[in-house]
Image: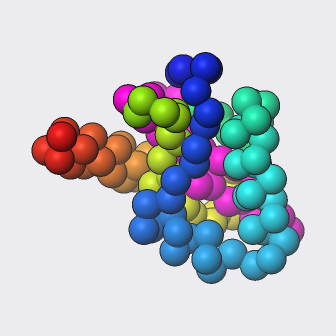
Amino acid sequence: MEFDKPIKVIFLPQAEEFADQLDKKSKQKLFAAIRKVKERVIGQWFTKLKSSDGIYEFRFDKSNKFYRLFAFWDTEEEIETLIVSTHGIEKKTNKTPPAEIAKAERIKKDYFEEKRKNK
């Protein structure tokens, strides 16, 4: 992670859809977590998933529901470091389904392949 460049969080289409369907309180929690990370305050609201290929998750819960927005770092940009949000889920337990981690990894792979094609 490059710490001399500002951090910008971007949403891919599925992440945007997830955020759009959240209720007001949940959105506030999500964007509070994003704000903290942009200010380089890292905590339980943004953690790397073990046994993943560089996948992180913004985490928050509300009313016994657990929300996850999956993301990865893109440090290749000149001006800023990107955190690219792939997609999100709502779940009833704190355990992250392996299929969702695999989905985030596929989206990450596709993102970097597409980026290299367009250079």
Residue at the image position 57 percent from the left and 48 percent from the top: 9
Q: Is residue 63 left or right of residue 43?
A: right
User: Relative to the observer, which residue lies in front, 11 or 100?
Assistant: 11
Highlighted range, magenta: 50-76
Residue at the image position 29 percent from the left and 48 percent from the top: 111
Is residue 55 on the magenta stretch? yes
- Residue 94: image location, x then y, percent: 69, 50
- Residue 29: image location, x then y, percent: 81, 59
- Residue 80: image location, x then y, percent: 52, 35
Q: Is residue 20 left or right of residue 112?
A: right
The colour scheme of the drawn protein is rainbow
Indicate whether 71 appears above or below 92: above
Q: Report whether residue 11 is seen.
A: yes
Q: In which quadrant of the rendered view does residue 48 lie?
A: top right
- Residue 101: image location, x then y, percent: 44, 46
User: Relative to the observer, which residue lies in front, 60 or 63?
Assistant: 60
Residue at the image position 53 percent from the left and 21 percent from the top: 1
> Which image quadrant: the C terminus?
top left
Q: Is residue 54 left or right of residue 6?
A: left
Is residue 78 on the magenta stretch? no
